[in-house]
Image: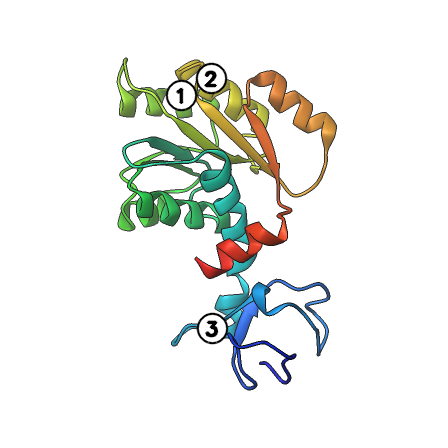
């Protein structure tokens, strides 16, 4: 809740419930730029709002700024029922891309189907994943963009990248990690990933994602 505003601030007012990104967010009181916060939508709890900034800035940077995902393209989202995965599904659906996902349990597959993800393959077994994706795509089909977390719990980033590259060599593979684990990143790049994105964003990227 905003308790004070600086001179020239007009987009938020004292008493507004807001969410955003700020250093030291676990403190009782913090000070930040009004550009980095947005009012909490009606009907949304503080807890729900607090979950949004990090995952949506990650997705905005990966699928928007880097991949430039657009209508009609096919995007594969690994671990699609997770936080970043669900945000990525929403982003892809909003721009009109065709969404493919992976999940590790029947209940997660069912949930993804319920939100419009028609094609869901295994996230646990690279062989099964490849078989299922080949069945979805057919012999001539291809995925344009892949979003994956380097820390997938079962099928890791290297295995996933190799499996994807077998589907089509020129697929754009974006790997996401939360820290600079260069050895692991190097292995993924050697396996064929197009690049990697750290879960660190610039101020302008954060502002855009929060406002969107």
Quadrant where the C terminus sits is bottom left
Graded by Cα atoms within 10 Å as few (under 14), some (14 to 19) or many (20 or more), the crowding at tag 2 reads some
C-alpha distance separating marks 1 and 3: 41 Å
| Mark toward the start of the polypeptide (1 vs 3) | 3
Dot placed on the residue nearer the N-terminal end, 2 or 3: 3
| Quadrant in the rendering for residue 97 | top left
Residue 206 horizontal/vertical position (percent): 57, 54
Q: Splitting the image into 4 quarters, where does residue 118 fall? A: top left
Q: Secondary structure at mark 2?
A: helix
Pair 2/1: label in front: 2
N-terminal label among 2 and 1: 1
Q: Which residue is mark 1?
A: 130
Point out residue 160 in the picture as x, y percentages from the top left corner: 51, 26
Residue beneath disc 3: 40
Residue 101 visible to an observer of this rendering: yes
Badge 2 is on which residue? 165
Asked if marks 2 and 1 touch (Cβ < 8 Å), the reply is no
Q: State the residue at coordinates (40%, 17%).
A: 167
């Amino acid at each position: 809740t905003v308790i004070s505003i600086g001179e020239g601030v007009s987009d938020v007012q004292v008493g507004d419930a807001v969410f955003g990104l700020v250093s030291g967010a676990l403190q009782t009181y913090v000070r930040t730029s009004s550009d980095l916060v947005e009012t909490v939508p009606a009907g949304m709890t503080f807890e729900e709002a607090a979950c949004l900034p990090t995952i949506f800035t990650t997705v905005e940077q990966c699928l928007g700024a880097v991949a430039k995902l657009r209508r009609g393209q096919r995007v594969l989202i690994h671990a699609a029922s997770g936080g970043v995965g669900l945000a990525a599904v929403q982003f892809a659906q909003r721009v009109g891309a065709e969404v493919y996902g992976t999940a590790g349990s029947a209940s997660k597959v069912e949930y993804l189907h319920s939100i419009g993800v028609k094609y869901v393959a295994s996230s646990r077994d690279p062989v099964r994943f490849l078989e299922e994706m080949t069945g979805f795509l057919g012999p001539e089909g291809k995925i344009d963009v892949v979003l994956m977390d380097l820390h997938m719990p079962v099928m890791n980033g290297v295995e996933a990248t190799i499996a994807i590259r077998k589907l089509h060599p020129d697929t754009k593979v974006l790997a996401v990690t939360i820290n600079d684990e260069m050895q692991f990143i190097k292995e993924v790049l050697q396996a064929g990933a197009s690049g990697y994105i750290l879960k660190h964003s610039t101020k302008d990227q954060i502002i855009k994602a929060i406002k969107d």
